[in-house]
Amino acid sequence: MESITVDHIGTLYVKYQDDLRAVRDAQRTFLRDRGRTMKAQLDDYEAEMTYLLLRDLRPEVVVEIGTFHGWSTMWILSALRDNGAGHLHSFDIVDNVVRNVPRELAADRWTFTQGDIQQHPEKIPAEKTDYLFVDADHGARFARWYIENLFPAVPPRTPASVHDVFHGRRPKPFSEGSVIVKWLADRNIDFLTPSTAKAPQVTEQLALVKKDVGLDEPVRDSDHNPMIFFTLP
Ligand SMILES: C[S@@+](CC[C@H](N)C(=O)[O-])C[C@H]1O[C@@H](n2cnc3c(N)ncnc32)[C@H](O)[C@@H]1O
């Protein structure tokens, strides 16, 4: 996969604009109809970037840690459906997601496992993982756990994303975000974030592309986009 840069994401918005428009419409409708049972967590740019990177990568195996009500799950499954390939393995302590993900979207492309992921890491198909999505426990200890146990187990150069890192210009002290950002910095690994607090120029650039292709109507009204995207060493 090409490196994760804002220019590359811009080209993906243009390339996949029609499919993305359909997914955005479906997600907006779902939220309107089922709003009370769907506490959506990902903001539009980070959700769309996840979708676009998965379209570009065409992964066989995606691992998602932290589903909650299933907003990110539905974005990821939409990308796999539109690729016509790939399987998502999702993990969470709570199982609200099972009641939310539409059956036709889950189809035969989704496996959900309930429980604390730290207690059964062997259930993650780590050595087969093509894309790793983390949006779970935001404490420093959890970050140290997946850095020590999961990162070394997935194949080299696996693309990954971690949510709730940049709600401000810096991650909160003693948080998952502070641990992962330091880990990346120590290894000179770049990340891309659409965080409006950390890197407002990213969403400003992408907003122009979205306007050009008529994708500027929001799906959700929240626009923090605190996720980071990077490629593991
Ligand atoms: C912020 S929510 C996920 C939001 C979801 N990705 C979305 O887009 O709506 C975090 C989720 O991580 C789960 N979680 C926290 N610690 C976990 C652990 N050790 N193992 C599995 N899931 C965990 C929580 O139960 C919660 O549902």
Image (cartoon, grey):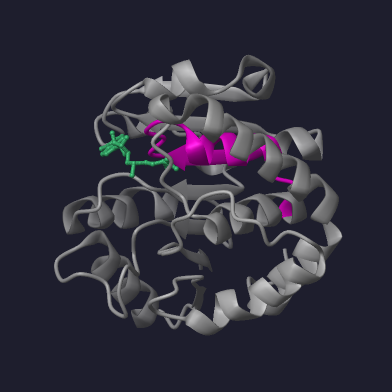
Q: Residue at x 57, y 61 (%)?
A: 45
Q: Residue at x 81, y 55 (%)?
A: 16
- Asked if residue 158 shows in the view, the reply is no
Percent of width and height locating residue 63: 51, 40
Quadrant of residue 30 within the rendered picture: top right
Q: Is residue 139 left or right of residue 17?
A: left
Quadrant of residue 212 within the rendered picture: bottom right
Percent of width and height locating residue 147: 33, 57
Q: Is residue 73 magenta?
A: yes
Percent of width and height locating residue 53: 67, 57
The part of the chain drawn in magenta is 57-78
Q: Residue at x 66, y 73 (%)?
A: 206
Q: Is residue 199 magenta?
A: no
**156 and 8: which is toward the camera:** 8
- State which quarter of the image contains the N terminus: bottom right
- Please tell me in which quarter of the rendered image ligand 1 is found: top left
**228 and 102: which is toward the camera:** 102
The total number of labels drawn is 0
Asked if 102 appears above or below 38 in the picture, the reply is above
